[in-house]
Image: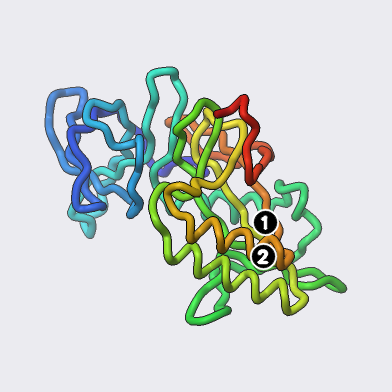
Amino acid sequence: MVFAQPLIPATLLRRYKRFLADVRLEDGREVTAHCANPGSMLGLKDPGMRIWLEPNDDPRKKLKYGWRLVEHADGHFTGVDTSVPNRALKAALQAGEIAELADYATVRPEVKYGQNSRIDFLLQRTGAPDLYLEVKCVTLLRAPGLGEFPDSVTARGAKHLAELTEVAQSGQRAMMFYLVQRTDVAQVTLAEDIDPTYAAAFDRAIAAGVEVLAYDCRISPQEILIGKRVPFERSPSGSLR
């Protein structure tokens, strides 16, 4: 996914009201940017961080900048726009770029299922069960190389796991796809201490046959692309802790 407009660097002053961030541009101007991320953004919202904004000239938009990336001191990037994973994954699925899922001919986004829910993607092929694919964005890093989900309590995430559990029990395929939207992660796990309820729902889902797949991203101020598969470990190895 290539950014529609060239990104520009800025310094984060504060993030507030979930969807707003005050920033300082390189020319010294202070502006308010839209933050397309309703989560806690743990570790990604410290004042003084170098960030990247996407400008726009859409007269319908009140805010003329959208916060897209955090650039870390070591040169790695994290994508903070939670709409990006589904958009990037949709393109990758349609292009057959996810090797484990490349034999599915039909990719349908936002299909109704469960209790007033929509599955992120329904994958279909002749002669095989449908695959219900739920996508979650991983941006939390508390130990070198180890990405974690979630970064805050997510009742909605636990609900999705329960619904995938029912899908698997009905004989269809169900999968959790954890997309790591940062470039410094080598392995993914659950942040059980942050949301033990989600972790318990995950364990029930796995026991019922729900599958797990995790991929990272290649991120730069020019684009965000699906990268390579990374291991998901319910109990990560000590070397990453």
Of the residues shown, which amino acid type is indicated by label 2? Val
Q: Is residue 221 above or below residue 189?
A: above
Question: Residue at the right extreme?
Answer: 127
The residue that appears at 66% across and 38% down in the rendered structure is: 230
Q: Is residue 32 left or right of residue 237?
A: left
Q: Residues within 10 Å of mark 1 (few under 14, many from 20)?
A: some
Residue 97 position, x and y percent, is 71, 46
The residue that appears at 50% across and 65% down in the rendered structure is: 158
Q: CA distance from mark 1 to mark 2?
A: 7 Å
The residue carrying mark 1 is 94
Q: Is the C terminus in the top left, top right, bottom left or bottom right quadrant?
A: top right
Q: Is residue 54 above or below residue 160?
A: above
Question: Residue at the top extreme?
Answer: 74
The residue carrying mark 2 is 107
Viewer-nearest residue: 17 or 122: 17
Q: Residues within 10 Å of mark 2 (few under 14, many from 20)?
A: some
Question: Residue at the left extreme?
Answer: 29
Q: Is residue 50 above or below residue 35?
A: above
Of the residues shown, which amino acid type is indicated by label 1? Gln
Viewer-nearest residue: 236 or 118: 236
Question: Residue at the bottom extreme?
Answer: 115
Q: Are marks 1 and 2 in contact (CB under 8 Å)?
A: yes
